[in-house]
Image (cartoon, rainbow, N blue to C red):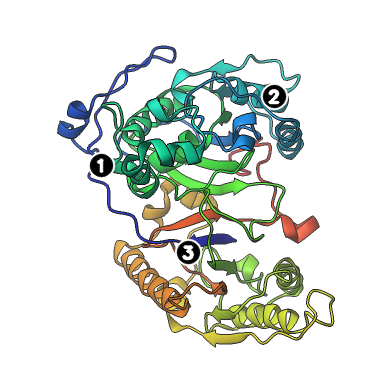
Amino acid sequence: MLLLAPSPPAAPSAAHRRKVGQSAHRVRCSSVRELERSPNPRPGERLPPLREAKRVVLVRHGQSTWNAEGRIQGSSDISVLTPKGESQAETSRLMLLSDSFDACFTSPLARSRRTAEIIWADRGEDLIPDSDLREIDLYSFQGLLKNEGKERYGVLYRQWQKNAANFSIDGHYPVRELWDRAQNCWERILAHEGKSVLVVAHNAVNQALVATSLGLGTEYFRILLQSNCGASVLDFTPQAGGGPPAVCLNRLNQTPNSPVASGSSAGRKTSKRIILVCQGATQNSAEIGVGGMGYAPLNMLGIIQSQKTAELLLDQKVNGILCSPQVAAVDTATTICEVQEAADCLGADCVPRYVEMKKLLELEIDDAFQTKQKSFGEIAQSGWLGSMEYRTLEGLWNQSKAAWQALLNELQDDTSERILVVVGHPDGPKGRGVVRCTNYTAHLGRWSIPITRTMETDEEF
């Protein structure tokens, strides 16, 4: 499941990143002039080649004293974990207990290092501190309460809030410097011989690590939400010929809490949300590879998955449900709709709800995907782009753009709260939303997919 909190578009970044050489313990911050004249690398070109598959799990530190106070931390090292933060770290330890990590990289800042110590517990290997994993450098802003930042810096603080990618302070571009640091971190993390690596760091730097691994620029700052002790999982697969590895964002910002609960996203309140739901399992799911699951009806597991997803959404007053015309998506959407409209009988609301349900042609899987595709193992070896014709993939991408526009048109342009549930196979957004979580399955109980797991064989990976 993927949850988006739509927000106004941010200005596109004009950032040009430079290639820098930094050790793990000594950092040289880039100046404004250096950043403005440097070239922009192609997506993913700076990831080092791999000899074998590798999984990297990113975890943000638990709640700190300055988090609780609403104070701007940046790369300062004054705040420590609160009791709540210690408890969050312990929950993360239990959540990741089944993974046989080979190494743990950590920011040297106290709040992150303490979180790493709790999660790492009695594992034999030493923690690996890396200065480039420290939080974003915010210079004169650091230590200020957020309302103090507004009062003292006015326009400059508003630029930080509205256009962070192009924000400069004290002669520096903090977000552009952060993207450089994240790229440098990947050189060391991926060079480690371990197949499963844990990284414990901070909100902004973890966002930058996810973005740079996927070839996304600084305009994606504040888009890829990282909650306290939220875990994100990235899978890297070697490519033939020794080029940069294929990257799969397996999970984003997994926490023990429900990602559909109301609240703010990245510190910004939102009244409109789009919740994407993948249809339940179908009768021919086991026989078909990547595509071809849409035309078959749900099997028993798919029915259970749909019911549990409907239960997860019961506390949300859903305004509308859009689905692919294919039968499995329609069945999943119908289950969610029926449970929503029975909210009063189920004790979740005092009055009946009416939920409008529509079929959206743009959410239907293209015919090219209904034929049997390569297995997931074959795709892991060749990379996603190597598993299908480029034109087919380009067609799917264009279709997903049209689907996103149709979804955004369903959100009324006013200040009223509105929740839209979408069932089908939509792809990534073109607009500037906040991605709160991806691939959430904890609500499925015994059928949930672990956030991470021991990788004893390449086939399991």
Q: Is residue 443 visible?
A: yes
In the image, what residue type sits under mark 1? Arg
Point out the frontmost of discs 1 and 3.
Answer: 1
- Residue 212 is situated, as x and y percent measured from the top left of the image, at 38, 39
In the image, what residue type sits under mark 3? Gln
Q: In this rendering, would 259 be left or right of 83?
A: left
Residue 99 figure quarter: top right
Q: State the residue position of label 3.
A: 373
- Residue 367 is situated, as x and y percent measured from the top left of the image, at 42, 78
> Which badge, 1 or 2, is on the more N-terminal residue?
1
Q: Is residue 267 above or below residue 128?
A: below
At horizontal 54% and vertical 66% (from top left) the residue drawn is 271
Q: Secondary structure at mark 3?
A: loop
Q: In this rendering, would 318 be left or right of 204?
A: right
Q: Secondary structure at mark 2?
A: helix
Q: Gap in Å between the C-alphas at discs 3 and 2?
A: 39 Å
Q: Which mark is residue 268?
A: none
Where, quadrant-wise, is the C terminus in this rendering?
top right
> Which badge, 1 or 3, is on the more N-terminal residue?
1
CB of mark 1 within 8 Å of CB of mark 3?
no
At horizontal 35% and vertical 64% (from top left) the residue drawn is 393
In the image, what residue type sits under mark 2? Trp
Where, quadrant-wise, is the N terminus in this rendering?
bottom right
Q: State the residue position of label 2.
A: 120
Q: Gap in Å between the C-alphas at discs 1 and 2?
A: 35 Å
Q: Is residue 217 visible?
A: no
Front-most of 333 and 29? 29
Q: In this rendering, would 83 be left or right of 224?
A: right
- Residue 459 is situated, as x and y percent measured from the top left of the image, at 60, 44
- Please tell me how crowded label 1 is: few (under 14), some (14-19), or many (20+) other residues with Cα within 10 Å: few
Front-most of 84 and 329? 84
Q: State the residue position of label 1.
A: 42
